[in-house]
Image (tube, grey):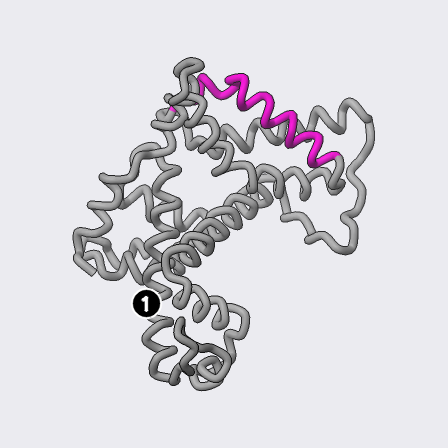
Amino acid sequence: MDPNVIDQRLSRISTLWTLVQQAHAGISGEAADAKERLMQRYCGAAYRYLLGALRDEDAAMEMFQEFAMRFVRGDFRNANAERGRFRDYVKTALRHLVTDYHRQRQVRPVGLPSDLAAPARDEDDEFLASWREELLSKSWESLAAAHPPLHAVLLAHAEQPDASAAELAVQLTDSEGRSLTAGNVRVMLHRARTHFAELLSAEVTQTLATPSEAELIEELRALRLLKLCRPVLDRHDSVDAEQL
């Protein structure tokens, strides 16, 4: 990969703060579209957080609808990139919703149903986990849409991390129905990891106020995604090894 690819990507991608400004610029079609894109980006993480915090599917959906209503009516219009990341505004709003929910009902949180994942250790960890999962999910979807064969190979490896390339090759076929070799699988896995790292880096970059290389690395580290993006960052000459 060209060593300037990250700089080009960072300069090319419209940051989420541009969408924030557009979303609260009025009632134009452009503003409505910006709000829709913001909701699409954050709705998954918001619902996961509420489900983990409230531990009740109906309550989580009720609070998510309240969050969406406040979002659409413009409660985030004062969000400022210089005062923090937009996901921090979202997290604060969701925490207030949870607090209000318990206060109104004067009940204490109950245990999670057995078929739901346990909540994170605290609210900050819980929201970061929800946001991390959302970014990963979007990156998987993008890889599947752009490179189905690479998605299939990487998914098979993720689901069976101890399987050898030869074992994975037996399970996989190419787009024309031909069996893959172990060598094919190794090459495709390498390409898949690189493409996934590019997509994930792009997803994170779009959420940054000033998408510099240093800020991207800091955010990836905070989200515990830095390792997954190393196939891209390692090839960039200006990235100090100590940063990774």
- For label 1, the crowd category at 10 Å Cα-Cα, with few meaning under 14, some 14 to 19 and many 20 or more, is some
Residue at 20 percent of width and 45 percent of height: 8
- Above or below, comparing residue 101 to residue 171 in the picture: above
Quadrant of the rendered image containing residue 45: top right
Left/right placement of residue 98 relative to residue 215 reads right
Quadrant of the rendered image containing residue 9: top left
- Above or below, comparing residue 177 to residue 12 in the picture: below
Residue 220, x across and y down, in percent: 39, 49
Question: What's the magenta bit mostly, secondary-structure-wise?
Answer: helix
Residue at 82 percent of width and 31 percent of height: 107
Residue 197, x across and y down, in percent: 36, 57
Q: Secondary structure at mark 1?
A: helix
Left/right placement of residue 28 relative to residue 116 reads left
Under mark 1, the amino acid is Arg
Quadrant of the rendered image containing residue 236: bottom left
Residue at 32 percent of width and 67 percent of height: 191
The magenta stretch spans which residues? 59-80
Residue 49, x across and y down, in percent: 62, 40
Reply yes or no: does residue 145 show up in magenta: no
Left/right placement of residue 91 relative to residue 149 reads right
Residue at 41 percent of width and 52 percent of height: 142
Q: Residue furthest front?
A: 176
Residue 6, x across and y down, in percent: 24, 50
Pointer 1: what residue? Answer: 191
Q: Nearer the viewer, residue 152 or 195?
A: 152
